[in-house]
Image (tube, rainbow, N blue to C red):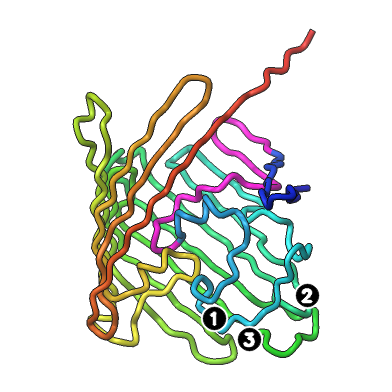
């Protein structure tokens, strides 16, 4: 069972405990799932991989969030990715998963998401046909709520088109319920992304240009919204130019840097800028087990 532990200085540790069974064609996982769903950034924010705790701020959930999350309360399992998944590697690479995030109590609703993605990479390693569906739920019926807890909210998103490590050309659609007892709102958009290695023989760095256009331009009521997506893809227009570099060493050690840069337009026609930086260090050690 996953758990969290806090040292006196506030450093938090998130162990990964997973049960896995399968073969070269299919795999079933239960427990703490190592993050990294094959969903595009407008549907699932890549920064979720670097923030394993449940994100409960208004800017992330897009609901009037007055739920009470007490510091140190065991309201969840402690790790963002926890549940089960079925992965398959024949006839393309796909996954069907359910991720349980928050338990249902009087102070806050249960929260989970379900995802499906399928990349037909046997067709082409670059122009890979792709389809994905994602469902996010913030609800529950088991408890009487304290004042301030928001209504049940749901978010449906999907993507179809071309999606690989090197190229993304995707049509996106969403249907968002801020209150499930009221009509939802449809939205859609277009997402374009490239992956351009610079002097790949020397492995210098990679440039990643991105363009996103929301259906808001065709109809102001059709703004694309994904609750768990990168919030910069909820605006009418976004253009980015990311720079990435990864160092791979021996013994399962890797170090990566990324500079996430972009400009965007708001519904009021105002221009904004984005400058984010990420640093990721990974160390993997496999302990061999032999029979005598």
The residue that label 1 is drawn on is 63
User: First in sequence: mark 1 or mark 2?
Assistant: 1
* Residue 171, position as x, y percentages in the image: 31, 65
Residue positioned 70% across, 77% down in the render: 68
Where 136 falls versus 254 (above or below)?
below
Asked if residue 25 is among those painted magenta in the image, a careful observer would answer yes
Looking at the image, residue 90 sits to the left or right of residue 13; the answer is: left
Where 235 falls versus 245 (above or below)?
below
User: First in sequence: mark 3 or mark 2?
Assistant: 2
Asked if disc 1 and disc 3 are in contact, CB closer than 8 Å, the reply is no
How far apart, in angstroms, are the residues tagged by discs 1 and 3? 9 Å
The residue that label 2 is drawn on is 105
**Neighbours of disc 1 within 10 Å: few (<14), some (14-19), many (20+):** some
Q: Nearer the viewer, residue 115 or 146?
A: 146
**Neighbours of disc 3 within 10 Å: few (<14), some (14-19), many (20+):** some
Q: Quadrant of residue 106?
A: bottom right
Looking at the image, residue 102 sits to the left or right of residue 212; the answer is: right
Q: Quadrant location of the C terminus? A: top right
* Residue 159, position as x, y percentages in the image: 38, 62
Asked if residue 30 is among those painted magenta in the image, a careful observer would answer yes
Q: Where residue 151 is drawn, which disc sits there? A: 3
Residue positioned 24% across, 63% down in the render: 239
Q: Nearer the viewer, residue 144 or 255?
A: 255
């Amino acid at each position: 069972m996953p758990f969290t532990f806090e040292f006196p200085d506030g450093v938090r540790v998130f162990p990964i405990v997973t049960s896995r069974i399968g073969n070269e064609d299919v795999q079933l996982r239960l427990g703490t799932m190592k993050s990294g769903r094959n969903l595009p950034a407008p549907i699932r924010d890549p920064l979720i991989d670097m923030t394993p705790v449940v994100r409960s701020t208004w800017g992330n959930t897009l609901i009037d969030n007055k739920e009470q999350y007490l510091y140190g309360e065991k309201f969840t399992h402690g790790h963002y990715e926890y549940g089960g998944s079925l992965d398959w590697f024949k006839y393309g690479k796909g996954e069907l998963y359910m991720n349980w995030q928050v338990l249902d109590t009087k102070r806050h609703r249960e929260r989970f998401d379900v995802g499906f993605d399928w990349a037909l990479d046997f067709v082409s390693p670059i122009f890979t046909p792709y389809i994905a569906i994602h469902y996010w739920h913030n609800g529950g019926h088991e408890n009487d709520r304290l004042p301030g807890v928001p209504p049940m909210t749901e978010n449906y998103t999907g993507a179809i088109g071309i999606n690989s490590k090197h190229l993304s050309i995707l049509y996106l659609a969403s249907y968002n319920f801020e209150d499930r007892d009221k009509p939802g709102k449809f939205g859609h958009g277009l997402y374009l992304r490239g992956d351009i290695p610079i002097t790949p023989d020397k492995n210098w760095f990679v440039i990643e240009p991105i363009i996103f256009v929301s259906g808001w331009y065709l109809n102001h009521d059709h703004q694309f919204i994904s609750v768990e997506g990168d919030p910069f893809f909820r605006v009418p227009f976004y253009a980015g130019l990311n720079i990435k570099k990864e160092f791979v060493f021996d013994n399962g050690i890797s170090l990566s840097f990324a500079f996430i840069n972009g400009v965007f337009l708001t519904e009021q026609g105002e221009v904004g800028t984005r400058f984010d930086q990420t640093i990721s260090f990974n160390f993997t050690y496999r302990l061999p087990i032999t029979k005598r």
